[in-house]
Structures are given as C-alpha cells and as structure tokens.
C-alpha cells in the first residue's frame, strides 16, 4: 500500500487497486485476450497450489511499484510487440492515475487464445 502524507491527512492506495488498474490497462492493448493466471487447463492445475496465484501482483518498495501480469495473447499476434505495449500502457496508466513511480512491469504470456470460428 502506498501512503502519502498531505496537508489534510494521509492518502493510501491499496495494491489491489493498483493491480486492477494494471489489469484494465493491459486489456486496452490490442491482441491481449485476457488477464489470467493460466493454470486452469487441467485437473492438476485446479488442485495445485500454483493455481492460487493472482493474475496481477503488485509489490511496493519505498513508494515504487513493481508489477507482474499474466496475460493470454490472441493467436497469431507478435507476442514481443504485444508484451512491450502492455508494459508501456500499464506503467503509464498507473503513473498517471496514482502518481506512483513504476520501476518495472513483468509480462508473463501464459497462454494463447484460439481463433474464433466464423
């Protein structure tokens, strides 16, 4: 949680709020199908403890945010290009909305969305 002291008191922004902003910002990028932990494809994934992690995590250290996102990209897209756009949009959106410095945005592409059939 980021805490700032102001003239009228203090301002606290929950890391859950920052994570929600990051998730919405990632979905604004073309060729991002969803933000997901991606571990739900098998029974083993449903039962394992690794499936319990959040699709977006935010760590705060000295007022600086570090964001990790798990996304599902659309099949056929240029994954490196999409990931770079996600990093830029997430960083810019958090900094504009919250005034919090973002030191890094790690994007993990954990799946591909199949093409929709016509």
Image: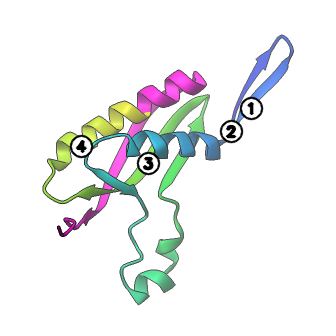
Q: Which mark is residue 68?
A: 3
The image quadrant of residue 62 is top right
What residue is at 14 percent from the left and 47 percent from the top?
A: 78
**Mark 2 or mark 1, which is nearer the start of the sequence?**
2
| Element at label 2 | loop
Q: Which residue is mark 4?
A: 82
Across and down, in percent, residue 3 comes to 73, 29
Residue 105, above or below 49: above
Q: Position of residue 88 (x, y in %)?
A: 34, 31
- The residue at the point 42 percent across, 50 percent down is 69
- Inspect the magenta stretch and tell me whether residue 107 lies in it: yes
Quadrant containing the C terminus is bottom left
Please tell me the numbered disc located at residue 50: none
Q: Do residues under tags 3 and 4 come within 8 Å of each other at their CB atoms?
A: no
Foreground tag (3 vs 4): 4
Label 1 close to label 2 by CB (< 8 Å): yes
Q: Residue furthest right?
A: 8
N-terminal-most mark, 1 or 4: 1
Residue of label 2: 1
Mark 2–mark 4 distance (CA, rounded to whole Å): 29 Å
Q: Earlier in the sequence, mark 3 or mark 1?
A: 1
Label 4: how many Cα within 10 Å (few below 14, some 14–19, many 20+): many
Is tag 2's residue or tag 4's residue first in the polypeptide sequence? Answer: 2
**Residue furthest to the top:** 7
The residue under label 1 is: 12
Where disc 1 sits, the SS reads strand
* Vertical position of residue 23 compared to residue 61: above or below: below
- Report the residue at 55% width, 45% height from top: 19
Colouring convention used in this rendered image of the protein: rainbow
Task: Left or right? Give the position of 59 relative to 70.
Answer: right
Q: Secondary structure at mark 3?
A: strand
């Amino acid at each position: 949680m980021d805490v700032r002291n102001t003239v009228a008191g203090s301002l606290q922004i929950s890391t859950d709020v920052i994570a929600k902003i990051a998730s919405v910002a990632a979905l604004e990028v073309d060729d991002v199908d969803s933000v997901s932990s991606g571990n739900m494809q098998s029974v083993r994934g449903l039962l394992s403890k690794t499936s319990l992690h959040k699709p977006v995590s935010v760590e705060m250290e000295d007022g600086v945010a570090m964001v990790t996102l798990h996304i599902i990209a659309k099949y056929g897209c240029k994954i490196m290009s999409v990931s770079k756009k996600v990093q830029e949009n997430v960083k810019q959106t958090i900094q504009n909305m919250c005034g919090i410095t973002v030191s890094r945005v790690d994007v993990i592409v954990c799946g591909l969305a199949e093409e929709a059939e016509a």
